[in-house]
Image: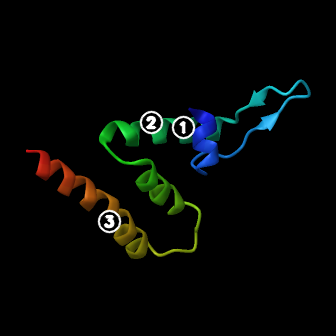
Amino acid sequence: MIRDYECRSLMPEPERSRSGYRKYAPAAKQRLRFVKRAQALGFTLAEIGELLELRVHPGRRYKQVEAEASRPMERLERRAGASW
């Protein structure tokens, strides 16, 4: 599953040992936990990618990030409302 996340750019490709084993940094483990928790809440992988992209651009203003982050939340709320 982690390799699929790497292909979708949800996870960075890890360093490799000389024998080829993947070596994950602590930040990668935190990111994986975020992805799994977001999936458990009902976010799609595409929506999770959008949320992760918000962290990549540190120069953004709070209001801009808040507006962008609210879009996946609104879609999730609409889906949840439709299932009730």
Point out the residue furthest to the left here: 84
Question: Which badge, 1 or 3, is on the more N-terminal residue?
Answer: 1
**Above or below for 21 versus 47:** above
Query: Cβ–Cβ below 8 Å for labels 1 and 3?
Result: no
Local secondary structure at mark 3: helix
* Residue contact between numbered discs 1 and 2, judged by CB atoms under 8 Å: yes
Q: Position of residue 16 (x, y in %)?
A: 82, 33
Q: Quadrant of residue 23?
A: top right
What residue is rendered at 57% in x and 74% in y? 59
Which quadrant is the C terminus positioned in? Answer: top left
Horizontal and vertical percent for residue 22?
Answer: 76, 30
Q: Around disc 2, counting alpha carbons within 10 Å, would you say few (fewer than 14), some (14 to 19), or many (20 or more)? A: some
Q: Residue at x 26, y 53 (%)?
A: 76
Q: Split into 4 quadrants, where in the image is the N terminus?
A: top right
Q: Which residue is mark 3?
A: 71
The answer for how far apart the CA atoms under marks 1 and 2 are is 6 Å
Residue drawn at point x = 58 percent, y = 68 percent: 57
Q: Amino acid at mark 3?
A: Arg
Q: Nearer the viewer, residue 46 or 17?
A: 46
User: Dot 1, crowdedness within 10 Å: few (<14), some or many (≥20)?
Assistant: some
Q: Is residue 49 left or right of residue 37?
A: right
Pinpoint residue 24: horizontal percent, then vertical percent.
Answer: 70, 33
On the image, numbered disc 1 is attached to which residue?
A: 32
Q: Which residue is mark 2?
A: 36
Which residue ends up furthest to the right in the rendered image? 18
On screen, residue 43 above or below 18:
below
Distance CA(mark 2)–CA(mark 3) = 19 Å
